[in-house]
Amino acid sequence: MVSRPARPFTGRPFGLRRDAPSKSDPRPQCGLVPEGRTVTFGFAPSSAASISTSASANPLARMLEPAEWAAAGIPLLRNPREVVSGLHARHRPGPTTAVVAVLDADERLNASASFTRRPTPADGWVFRNALLAQLRRVIPHDLRRRTPVRTAVLLYCRDGDARWTEEDGAWMWGLRDACTLHGLRCGAYITLTRDGWQVLGEGRGGRRPSSDSIPESMEAFAAAEPVQPRTGGAASELLRRAAAR
């Protein structure tokens, strides 16, 4: 039997941790380069993402100009004064009070809610959340419908004149977005000031009601509405003809 010489030991000394480099080990520690700089991993954000983030963080980006509102195809109210008078009598809004209402295809009121705006900078995202919370509270959504059948309108009572402001632009943005998220058609935005009411984007308005006028009673407003008599259908028509003979 031929004996072979023993190979020299080249492993680590006994008791030395595997993750602890020896003093003679020239390799750098994990996460550091020989110069001592820290190594980071990941991707730098693109310029488009930076622009999108800055735009979403800017409240002025969440508002609509009058030209944008007019080009959005907002449906016209057949009788805006009747809608304004009804909401004014029902909710009696004061300054910084918003009234959101849902109308059916015949402009009959399905639901409405009023709330006071918080003293925060005008931001369409904040207004959208406030409007959406009120809509969810008073009426179910119509997201399952292919085409919206109900329309949401917004009446906002504020100080100043009837001219468009950045606050109005933020309310327009919020109303449009809230209607989309609740399955409704975006309707008119109406301001109520000391000068009267004004449907922005249409040029229609009136002197009464105004933010200073006394609201009409609901009884008087309901009495002024025409009541359509019920005929009872074909059976009632036959009885009426028989009695006429």
Image (cartoon, rainbow, N blue to C red):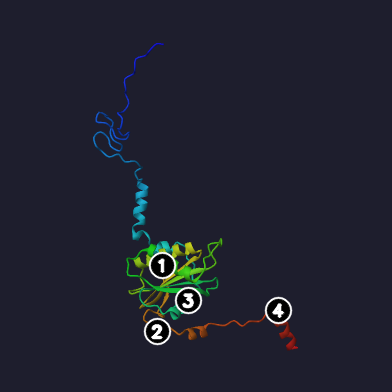
Disc 2 from disc 4: Cα separation: 45 Å
Q: Of the numbered discs in the image, which one, if any, rests on residue 83?
A: 3
Q: How many marks?
A: 4
Q: Which mark is residue 130?
A: 1
Give the crowd class for mark 4: few <14, some 14-19, many >=20 residues within 10 Å. Answer: few
The residue identified by callout 2 is 214
Label 1 vs label 3, nearer the camera = 1
Which mark is nearer the camera, 1 or 4?
A: 1
Badges 2 and 1: C-beta atoms under 8 Å apart? no
Label 3 environment density (alpha carbons within 10 Å; few <14, some 14–19, many ≥20): some
Label whose residue precedes the other's in the sequence (2 or 1): 1
Q: Amino acid at mark 4?
A: Ala
Q: In the drawing, does residue 201 fall left or right of residue 7?
A: right
What secondary structure is marked by label 2?
A: loop
Alpha carbon separation for disc pair 1 and 4: 48 Å
Q: Secondary structure at mark 4?
A: helix
Residue 185 in the figure: left or right of residue 128: right
Q: Label 1: few (<14), some or many (≥20) within 10 Å?
A: some
Q: Nearer the viewer, mark 2 or mark 1?
A: 1
**Which labelled disc corresponds to residue 234?**
4
Secondary structure at numbered mark 3: helix
